[in-house]
Each structure stands twice: as structure tokens, then as C-alpha cells.
Amino acid sequence: MNKANQCPECGRINEVLGRVGDRWSVLIVISLAQYGTLRFNELKRHLGISQRMLSLTLRALERDGLVNRTYHPTIPPKVEYSLTPLGQSFRKPVEVMGLWALENLGAIDKARAAYDAEAVAEDA
Amino acid sequence: MNKANQCPECGRINEVLGRVGDRWSVLIVISLAQYGTLRFNELKRHLGISQRMLSLTLRALERDGLVNRTYHPTIPPKVEYSLTPLGQSFRKPVEVMGLWALENLGAIDKARAAYDAEAVAEDA
DNA sequence: CAGGATCCCTCAGGATACTG
DNA sequence: CAGTATCCTGAGGGATCCTG
């Protein structure tokens, strides 16, 4: 049970990462940003996420004020999810991240290949 | 065993998140960005990370070409870690993320509190 | 259709001990 | 000091079945 982090900012970063940093949260926000509004099963199909995780993640996002949940009491029921303004504001950091990914995934792959080749070479 | 993601970009995002998206990678990059060069135990103390995870994460980052590892064969040994240019380039997305975190953590907390209050209220 | 409730399994990741 | 090797737990997350 270490004191976690000495540097305060690390604590902050950790916090935010712990909240909206998991893969599914990010992907859901991206999808909603792209399509505006999606229903439960639309998201499920689109992301290939299990219904359990979708349910959990959506509730967490709603709780954190990133996602709006609109329930239509029809039969069959219809629930629509969309981004709140806060959720919208999260698009920018995500986009920057995504852009970096697109630009540098190649470099990472190359570095990785080089590293692995080196490792093999050392197994003389 | 679903097809994972229908949307190709989700695949990319997932990929990058799977590589450098975990908490420790991010925190290490931030620390190195801040201090330029750090030794193993300096990082360990600074982050409050277990030495196992530090070791694993550093090797992964080195493999991905984000950090440089410099080994000084002295006694006692001395190993220094620093960012590669690729690692440097990762600072920007991280900073944007961090900034967003700082600006919006408060809002998230408020939303969360409101949500929880609502939930309690419904337990009539 | 939208999800709650279970079951179960994998593995991230901490604690500890040992080595060069 | 800078790691490697083990052990062990708990959270993450899929599969499945059930309901309104």
C-alpha cells in the first residue's frame, strides 16, 4: 500500500484515467460523437462489446455526466444515448490522441520490430 | 468471440490504447518529459509504482521506441531512462488529456454527486 | 429492445525474495 | 542499484439466462 504518487499531477492524471480512460468509455464517446445518437443495441453491434460491459460503461458515463440517457417508454422500449456538452468537450483530447495514434503507430511497429530483431540477434 | 469492432478506427484507437494507454506508461512518459532523465529507482520512488510493473512497463516502452535505456556498467550499476523523439511527440496528446482532466474533473465530480443524490432520492 | 443477475475465467499488478 | 522470478489476489470482462 504505497503512497501511490508523490507528484500531485500524477494523481490527477491517474484519476481521470481511472474514470474515462478505459477502452470502452473512449470508444463509446467516439461512437456517439460520430453518430450523435445511438440506441443500446446499435452501440453494442457497432463496438462488438458485450452487453454487460456496455451497460456498465454507459451507466458510469452517465454518472460522470458525459452521456445523456433518454428513455422512451414505448413497447418495445427504446433508449437513446448521446453526448452531453461535457462529453463533447472530451472529443478534443480523444481526437488528439487518435491523430497521434494514426501518425505514429507505424513508427511504433518499426521500433518494435527492430527491438525484437535485436533481441533475437543476441540469442547467439 | 465477436469480431471485436466493426468500425476500423475503433480498432486503431484500441490498438494505441493497448500499447501506450495504460496508466503506468502515461505516468512514466510524463515523468521523463518533466525531468529529462531518470534512473530506475528515481522513477520508482517518484511514481510509487511497484518495481515489477516499472520494469515491465519500461521494457515495453523501450520496445515501442518511446524511451531510451542507457546502461552504465559501473558498480553499482546505473541505468538511465529518457524519452526518444517518438516519446517526446507523445507529450502533446498527453498534455491535452491532462489539461482536459484538470479543467473537467470538477464537473465530473459534480455530475457524479448529482447522479448519486438522484439515485438516493429514488429510493423512496 | 434494453438491461439485470450469475457464473466463471483470465490476467493486471502488488508483495516478497533472490541475483549480478 | 537494477533488475528477475514466484506467488497470490481481485478486478475486468465475456457468456448465458431471465424479465418488463
Image (tube, coloured by chain):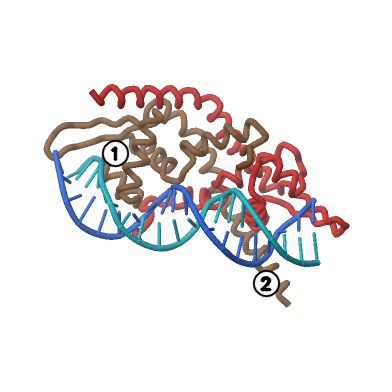
Chain colours: A red, B brown, C blue, D cyan
Q: Which residue is label 2 attached to? A: B120
Residue furthest right in the image: A74
Secondary structure of the residue carrying tag 1 is strand
Question: Which amino acid, mark 1?
Answer: Leu
User: Is A13 above or below relative to A63?
Assistant: above
Secondary structure of the residue carrying tag 2 is helix
Question: Which amino acid, mark 2?
Answer: Val
Q: Earlier in the sequence, mark 2 or mark 1?
A: 1
Chain letter belonging to callout 2: B
Residue depicted at 16% across the width and 32% down the height = B73
Residue furthest left in the image: B75
**Residue C3 point in image, percent of width and height:** 70, 59
Q: Quadrant of the C terminus of chain B?
A: bottom right
Residue depicted at 31% across the width and 47% down the height = B52
The numbered disc on residue B38 is: 1
On screen, residue B83 versus residue B124, left or right, reads left
Chain letter belonging to callout 1: B
Q: Nearer the viewer, mark 2 or mark 1?
A: 2
